[in-house]
Image (cartoon, rainbow, N blue to C red):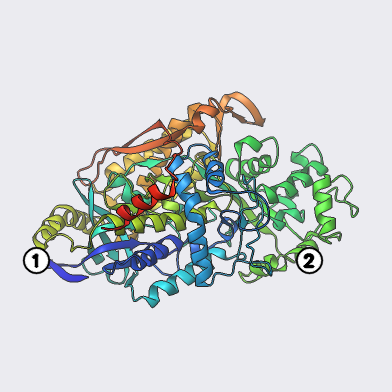
Amino acid sequence: MQTMEYAQGAVRIPVYALDCLVIGSGCAGYNAADWLYDLGRRDIAVLTEGKNRGTSRNTGSDKQTYYKLSLSGADADSVQAMADDLFAGGGMHGDSALAQAAGCVPCFMKLCQLGVPFPTNRYGEYVGYKTDHDPRQRATSAGPLTSQEMTQRLEAAVESKGIPIFDGMQAVRLLVEENRICGVLCVDLARQEKDCGFTVFCANHVILATGGPAGVYKTVVYPQSQVGGTGMALQAGAGACNLDQWQYGLASLQFRWNVSGTYQQVLPRYITQAPNGAQTEWLPQALPSPQKAMNLTFLKGYQWPFDAAKIEGSSFLDLLVYQETCRKGNRVFLDYQKDPVGFSPDFAGLGEEAASYLRNSGADMPLPINRLEHMNPAAVELYRCHQIDLHSQMLEIGVCAQHHNGGIAVDADWQSSIRGLYVAGEAAGTFGARRPGGSALNACQVGAMRAAQHIAYHSAEVPPKSWNRVQELIQAEVLPLFYQVQQRMDGGALDVQAACASFRERMSECAALVRIPEEMARLQSDIQQTLSDFYQPGAQSTGAPAQLLRAWDIMITQLAVLDAMQAAAPYGSRGSALVANAKGRQILPGLAYLPALREEWLDGQVLSTQLKKPGGLDGGPIRFCSAYEPVRPMPQPDRWFESVWGEYRARTQR
């Protein structure tokens, strides 16, 4: 890696030049760097805002389950069967499904060899369990912090190899020439007061592993440190897909954690609190009977993500909580201190599934907190460690965004539409409407591996651009932004930080699990106007340069997501979205919805989104265009060994 400095007048910008740069320090980022090294690359580095930030290190729920090929028992399974099940989720490319299925075993076994404690029986079988949309017992777990274990083990592997890690660097722009990546502009968070902290990394290859765009919404289960960086790739012109598809579900708000599994199965009370402080056990009143309320509560433990196909069942509970919080302005709590109205110690009135589960678990005792302590004491301890005692405190919840199933579009090697730019992890759009729970962890590992393999097998390790070309790039792309940011820090009429916060709240209200087309259109127009004025006289930021540029990244992502959601809305309620329509079927007072239309056709399509008008420093509106395109079909590769052996040698020998 070469180190230089660009100087113009009083401006000093550090410049690093290297072959491969990985942005992100979660499961995907560290795995990409580790694979690059093992495949012979040495001129590589990892860049991160903070090693201890991000979703992989700080969350559980979907991040505690690893979805892989069955590796135990007598049940038949195969790479093709797993690929078919992934592909059946709808809106997913066939080659991506096959690659994820084929790559799951080497990636999983690598994690086992690094010391991630996935359990085996005494004979060494990696036993599994079923998860959402999983016809077989493919899922496994190393506990509630599986992704944290993965991150720590992969980080140790990267550090043991001496791979440089640039900590405290916020990537803010991708530098692209003739549709090829050539570098990344960052803000050094430790030196923002000097030259805005601008630092340039010139690179031949960049792997973007910044996680999901959590900053899009206010109500999220992502950790507060997770914001995302999808806007960089969108602004650079990278195509995106399925930006409308997310996962939403019930989660606690003070300490952000999904309240799935036993948190629901022990049957807590649902309490609503009005703005005047009045509290009511409202769920039995909102449903036909207390028994119905308890049965839906139990089902929500198994069926955590909101699903438009389940709005007559467990997902109706999400809608009720959304209605109370986002439309009525009330607060909703889970109370583990008392049994819900209608609860009977002999479980009379409960469905057979719920009653059998509680009896078989030995949880036939009064009070939800006692049942939770008996079945899952770690669940109680988790909140106690975050200063919430479920014995004496209620747990405030909301319907939160948890995972983005869409993202930047990639091919079967996880390369984006910009040559040399690869995207791995949640930032990559490798899923559609439905996916098996836990498949995100497998996708982040496989995507990182395949990106590293493609770089290693298809390019030589060479120095980046000449110094003269680097200087020209900085003058053309970096300095104009530098002067604009400096000017905007001086104050004015438009507070972009406040605008960004308002947009996040409005996204949660009208563009999350419930999509309200009229409100989405107004929100899109307001964001578009703010972005047009962003660098005009009168704009300001109440924070540092990094916060100003973060607001830009969030808003441009919101604009693209809204464009995709509005393109999808005429096709009705599907996957994670209930599309509100005054002439549709009424599901709640004041809430009618449009049923799914042409769903079978949609399963064979991806919703592509592309930047059409950049806008930016010279003002003018930023525009995206979204349209459906056929999925890439499931490949039918040659599996004759002699043929594959020859092709493999040709592909892996540069």
Q: CA distance from mark 2 to mark 1?
A: 68 Å
Q: Residues within 10 Å of mark 1 (few under 14, many from 20)?
A: few
Mark 1, secondary structure of its residue: loop
The answer to which of 565 and 421 lies nearer the viewer is 421
The residue furthest front is: 642
Secondary structure type for disc 2: helix
**Amino acid found under the numbered disc labelled 1:** Gly
Do we see residue 496 in this rendering? no
Closer to viewer: mark 2 or mark 1 = 2
Q: Position of residue 463 (x, y in %)?
A: 18, 64
Q: Quadrant of the C terminus?
A: bottom left
Q: Residues within 10 Å of mark 2 (few under 14, many from 20)?
A: some
- Expressed as whole percent of the image width and height from the top left, the position of residue 297 reads 73, 48
- Foreground residue among 6 and 360: 360
- Asked if one can make out residue 595 in the rendered structure from this viewpoint, the answer is yes
Q: Is residue 378 above or below residue 135?
A: below
- Quadrant of residue 129 within the rendered picture: bottom right
Query: What number is the disc on residue 9?
Result: 1
Q: Earlier in the sequence, mark 2 or mark 1?
A: 1
- The residue to which callout 2 is attached is 374
x then y, percent, for residue 149:
53, 69
User: Quick one: 72 or 405, which is closer to the camera?
Assistant: 72
Is 482 displayed left or right of 7 in the figure? right
Q: Is 337 displayed left or right of 207 in the figure?
A: right
Q: Give the left or right position of residue 618, taking residue 48 as reference.
A: left
Q: Is residue 624 above or below residue 205?
A: above
Tell me the kind of residue under disc 2.
His
Split into 4 quadrants, where in the image is the N terminus? Answer: bottom left
